[in-house]
Image: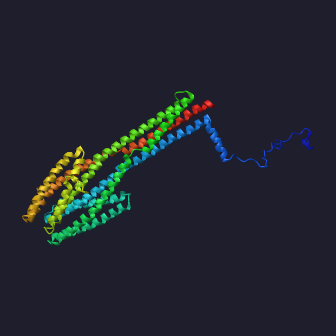
């Protein structure tokens, strides 16, 4: 059957034959006036549609949901990141900067003690007890071992590594000079005293200055880790305030529009975000309090006590070397007076701080107050015995009597024995303050990591609450 169009064209099929499914006529594409097919929506058109969709009540709900979820997620991410950064700093305190600071102080103390012990052994000559020689060798061995450990554990500036390398090289040179001095002394050659004074000058002017530089560098690193670990996560706290404020404000908006007092989803999100924020504040404040306790009861008192021990060792070296010089120079008497002033100066003088022993006593925790009080008494006894020896050496010109008043083979009744008793008390106090540091700082990094995890986990129900609360309102438009 065929059909004739108005133009006279026949369209149809043969009688009794249906058109094949694949050959059925399809609707021709719509063309524009220029004969071209329209392209996909332009970016401007899509933006206009988004603006139109966002201006409708459902659209505004969706936009609000995205913004609220973003605020919650930003808070969780910021809190986890900032708290984890503080946990890493707290871990460095216990496992890295704290031990390195302690090792640097022990390097200085061992080197200074080796210098005083070498001078004491030289003065005793053939009467030098084996224990004194072993103490000198032990000081050098300990300093060498700690230098190797510090070089392996230091990941800081090349300046620190260079200082350690210089110390290692200079220590070998110093020990060689001391052995030459001992050899000459055993043979009764006066050149031995000159070698020992030269070795001590190398120790005082070069080795110990580099050791002090290492101590200062490690203490600065320790302070930086303390500052990083104790700092409050203000950015996360600000994000929490913004999130809580936005949730509260939008719930008021919904109440005014719908006259419904509560949106359970948003109320739950607010509660979860508030709990997370509260946990952040309490946890961060508690960790900072523990670290502050570690700093004020351990690190800072220990630093002050180490400074006092360093000054005392320097004074003791000057005391012994003055006798090695046999009155040929007043240098060591001047140094003794300067070091005693550094220990006991009652108040600052210009840029010069108060006495290191006075500061160490003032900063000490109650747990070591008794030991430091006893150490002050031993320090007074040491000064008295030194003055007796100085009187015999300067006025009476009795070198043997001055030597006996300064150092004895049996280690009793001399200035040297009073110094050793004082130093033992200071060492015991330092060990106690070191324990105070460890006890207060230990496990703080683990607590902070747990805090970061908890805050992050609490943001999950907060985000879910936002989604459920918004979806509940969207359902009313369907």
Residue 172 image offset from top left, x and y in percent? 28, 66
Image quadrant where one finds the C terminus: top right
Residue 26 image-quadrant placement: top right
Q: Judge whether 310 appears above or below 83 on screen.
A: below
Q: Judge whether 5 appears above or below 316 on screen.
A: above
Residue 172 or 109: which is nearer the viewer?
109
Question: Left or right of 29: which side holds 66?
Answer: left
Residue 237 image-quadrant placement: top left
Residue 211 or 428: which is nearer the viewer?
211
**Residue plotted at (23% across, 60% down):** 112
Q: Judge whether 33 appears above or below 389 on screen.
A: above
**Residue plotted at (18% across, 50% down):** 375
Mark count: 0
Image color mode: rainbow
Question: Left or right of 60: which side holds 164?
Answer: left
From this viewpoint, is residue 373 visible?
A: yes
Q: Judge whether 336 appears above or below 372 on screen.
A: below
Residue 300 image offset from top left, x and y in percent? 28, 49
Q: Residue furthest front?
A: 350
Residue 477 image offset from top left, x and y in percent? 62, 31
From this viewpoint, is residue 100 visible?
A: no
Image quadrant where one finds the N terminus: top right
Q: Residue furthest left?
A: 396
Residue 7 image offset from top left, x and y in percent? 91, 43
């Amino acid at each position: 059957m065929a059909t004739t169009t108005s133009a006279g064209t026949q369209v149809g099929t043969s009688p009794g034959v249906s058109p094949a499914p694949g050959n059925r006529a399809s609707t021709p594409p719509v063309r524009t006036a220029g004969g071209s097919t329209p392209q996909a929506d332009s970016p401007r058109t899509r933006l206009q549609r988004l603006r139109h969709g966002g201006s409708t009540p459902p659209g505004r709900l969706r936009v609000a949901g995205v913004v609220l979820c973003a605020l919650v997620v930003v808070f969780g991410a910021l809190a986890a990141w900032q708290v984890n950064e503080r946990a890493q700093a707290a871990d460095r305190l216990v496992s890295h900067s704290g031990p390195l600071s302690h090792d640097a102080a022990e390097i200085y103390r061992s080197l200074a003690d080796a210098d005083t012990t070498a001078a004491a052994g030289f003065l005793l000559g053939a009467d030098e007890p084996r224990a004194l020689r072993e103490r000198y060798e032990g000081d050098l061995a300990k300093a060498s071992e700690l230098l190797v450990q510090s070089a392996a554990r230091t990941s800081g500036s090349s300046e620190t590594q260079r200082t350690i390398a210089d110390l290692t090289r200079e220590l070998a040179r110093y020990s060689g000079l001391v052995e030459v001095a001992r050899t000459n002394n055993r043979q009764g050659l006066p050149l031995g005293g000159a070698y020992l004074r030269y070795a001590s000058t190398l120790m005082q002017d070069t080795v110990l200055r580099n050791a002090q530089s290492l101590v200062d560098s490690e203490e600065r690193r320790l302070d930086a880790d303390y500052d990083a670990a104790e700092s409050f996560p203000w950015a996360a706290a600000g994000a929490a305030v913004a999130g809580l404020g936005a949730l509260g404000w939008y719930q008021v908006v919904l109440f005014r529009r719908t006259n419904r007092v509560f949106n359970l989803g948003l109320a739950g999100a607010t509660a979860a975000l508030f709990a997370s924020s509260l946990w952040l504040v309490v946890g961060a404040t508690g960790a900072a309090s523990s670290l502050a306790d570690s700093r004020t009861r351990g690190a800072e008192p220990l630093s002050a006590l180490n400074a006092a021990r360093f000054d005392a060792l320097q004074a003791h070296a000057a005391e012994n070397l003055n006798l090695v010089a046999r009155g040929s120079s007043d240098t060591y008497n001047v140094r003794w007076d300067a070091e005693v002033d550094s220990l006991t100066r009652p108040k600052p003088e210009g840029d010069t701080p108060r006495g290191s022993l006075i500061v160490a006593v003032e900063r000490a925790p109650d747990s070591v107050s008794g030991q430091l009080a006893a150490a002050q008494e031993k320090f007074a006894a040491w000064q008295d015995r030194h003055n007796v020896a100085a009187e015999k050496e300067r006025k009476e010109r009795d070198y043997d009597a001055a030597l006996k008043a300064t150092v004895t083979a049996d280690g009793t009744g001399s200035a040297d024995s009073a110094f050793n008793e004082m130093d033992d008390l200071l060492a015991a106090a330092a060990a106690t303050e070191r324990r105070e540091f460890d006890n207060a700082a230990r496990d703080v990094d683990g607590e902070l990591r747990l805090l970061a995890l908890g805050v992050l986990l609490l943001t999950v129900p907060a985000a879910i609450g936002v989604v459920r609360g918004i979806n509940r309102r969207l359902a009313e438009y369907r």
